[in-house]
Amino acid sequence: MKKFILLFTLSVFGLLTFGQQVERGISIIPEPVSVVKKGGHYVLPDNIVISAPAGDEMSFISEHLTKKLSTALGKKVTVRNNVASADIVLTVNAKTDTKIGNEGYTLSVTSGNVNISANKPAGLLYGVQTFLQLLPPQVESDKPERNVSWQVPQVEITDYPRVGWRGLMLDVSRHFFTVDEVKQYLDNMVKYKYNLFHWHLTDDEGWRIEIKSLPKLTEVGAWRQEQIGWFGGFSQPDPDAPKNYGGFYTQDEIKEIVQYAKERNIQVMPEIDVPGHSSAILAAYPELSCFPESGAHAVRTGAPFLDWNTGGRPAAMYENTLCPSNEKVYDFLDKLMTEVASLFPFEYIHTGGDEAPYTFWEKSPEVKQLMQREGIKDMAGVQSYFGKRLERIILSKGKKMMGWDEILEGGITPTTALMSWRGVNYGIEASKSGHYVVMSPTNYVYIDYMQGDISTEPRVYASLRLNQTYKFDPIPEGADANYILGGQANLWTEQVYNIRQAEYMTWPRGFAVSESLWSPKERKDWDQFVLKTENHFMRFDYAKTKYSPAIYDPIVRVTRDSEQYFVELTTEISGLDIYTSFDSSTPDNFYPRYAKPQLIPKDAVMMRIITYRGDTPIGRLLSIPVEDLKKRVR
């Protein structure tokens, strides 16, 4: 990693003039509404006095700023309440500034001090994040950094969010993340002004939340046999193998994380995924299935159990759906939602509703009786019946229901909110019919997708480059903006085994999503965003946060003309040169520079590819077997 930091620093900054370095000093993500550069800098003194309002909501903000300035800068920091003069002044407006709203702020850096004002503490929190991004990248270090000029450019910034819902989803069912790891994820969210943590707590592969009235959910449903490799392609698990992989959050831990998030102006929305994705529930309580006597109910490991070759909704080899005709299911859901609602202050509970196979419902005599009794014509109507009964339970707990866009198919009540993931059209449709919508389309914000060449990534079924994510618009043309709550990115963790990989998958695409959700549409600029991203890579190096360098790797396409294969290489960002070899050697910038599609030699076995910026290697060395290249022809 140290070598990478050195190479990166040389490549990004060694070739720049001093004037360009100063220009790059303002690298704020997400881009503010307005930035006026006044020239000059404010140099932070050795003894820093922070003036801040008193109160519980301010305590984290003051402590966070103090820790940053005292740790990396090595400064002595004193916090006082509403003093007349200070080096950094945080002020809650006495008179509301209607322009900036509850989360906006103004930030002024003069030759004498820094002033941040807002209507609410949330705005001050985001103003502090922007202030820290005005400082050199070393501010993210966990130890004193010497020989750094701790100065801030003199600017006037006015800033407020474009949309209210700015979310990231973390799936902790497929792979479990500890309390500290979830907090680590939240810490990076607040840096980029996210305010909604969608916590995917349940799925076929594990149940992660303690429900005291239903103890088997965690005694049985939280554990499975461990299998490592390509999730979805595992061999069927050994039924006698120990089930010791997994985990769950106690209710005290849930409360701890909810409070931790609240201090960072992040709401936590739980997801309890039903009626499909319920294998972990049925492993614990098989009587909630349509066929409890089958004996096949188990927490899934990642071995195949759904058939996706159906052209639409999957078919189930093993039952993973709650039985909508079984009254025990609704008693179960009432107990469950009583406890979930008490743990999460946020107004919505997400109930999934996606990818529910109809396989076992179609076989069930009891479901057929339900359809006859209720006048239901098809299985989409059966799911709608289930969803409406579930919503009544949730409403009785003082909460609102949200689900994935499949819940539209059989009809939903006016009070149900929708998360549009299969593109934007379902969200547009729902908004026009008066339903609140969160935009979360796969083709822009599914950050479990591969972000670089397949030779560098855990293999999944689709790719999503940073430049595509940056095109995300949470208020697409045709939607009723009055019903668009906002948007979010989703990190499913089938191929994400640990927090380092979760960080790698989230960043820098999380930068792009944050800018799409916060910044005015007209303020977005891809080329400027790339420059800012490179600055934030340095910040992450100092913070020891992992990220993907895929923007430096070429995009590889293969075409075929008769019996000849050609490799076409392009770069996602400008200013890079590409060098290749087919002779099993490692190319560098003394090799011929790539200029046009290259013919794969008849007997070649391996292609190697690397990008340079000037004389410095910047991309990863890609080593791709010719056999694999030929499989890429479309």
Image (cartoon, helix red, strand yellow):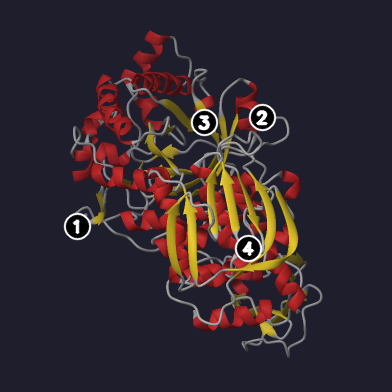
Q: Earlier in the sequence, mark 2 or mark 4?
A: 4
Q: How far apart are labels 2 and 3 at the CA level? A: 21 Å
> Which of labels 2 and 3 is toward the front?
2
Identify the element where label 2 is drawn.
Answer: helix
Residue 406's tag is 3
Q: Amino acid at mark 1?
A: Pro
Identify the element where label 3 is drawn.
Answer: helix
Identify the element where label 1 is drawn.
Answer: loop
Label 2: how many residues lie within 10 Å, few (<14), some (14-19) or many (20+)?
A: some
Q: Earlier in the sequence, mark 2 or mark 1?
A: 1
Identify the element where label 4 is drawn.
Answer: loop
Determine which residue is flagged by label 4: 112
- Relative vertical location of residue 15 with respect to residue 425 in this rendering, above or below: below
- Find residue 404 and report its horizontal and vertical position in percent: 50, 34
- Find residue 270 and report its horizontal and vertical position in percent: 39, 38
- Relative vertical location of residue 169 with respect to residue 366 in this rendering, above or below: below
Q: How far apart are labels 3 and 4 at the CA level? A: 56 Å
Label 4: how many residues lie within 10 Å, few (<14), some (14-19) or many (20+)?
A: some
Q: Residue at x 65, y 71 (%)?
A: 552
Left/right of residue 19 with respect to residue 358 in the rendered view: right
Q: Quadrant of residue 634?
A: bottom right
Residue 481's tag is 2
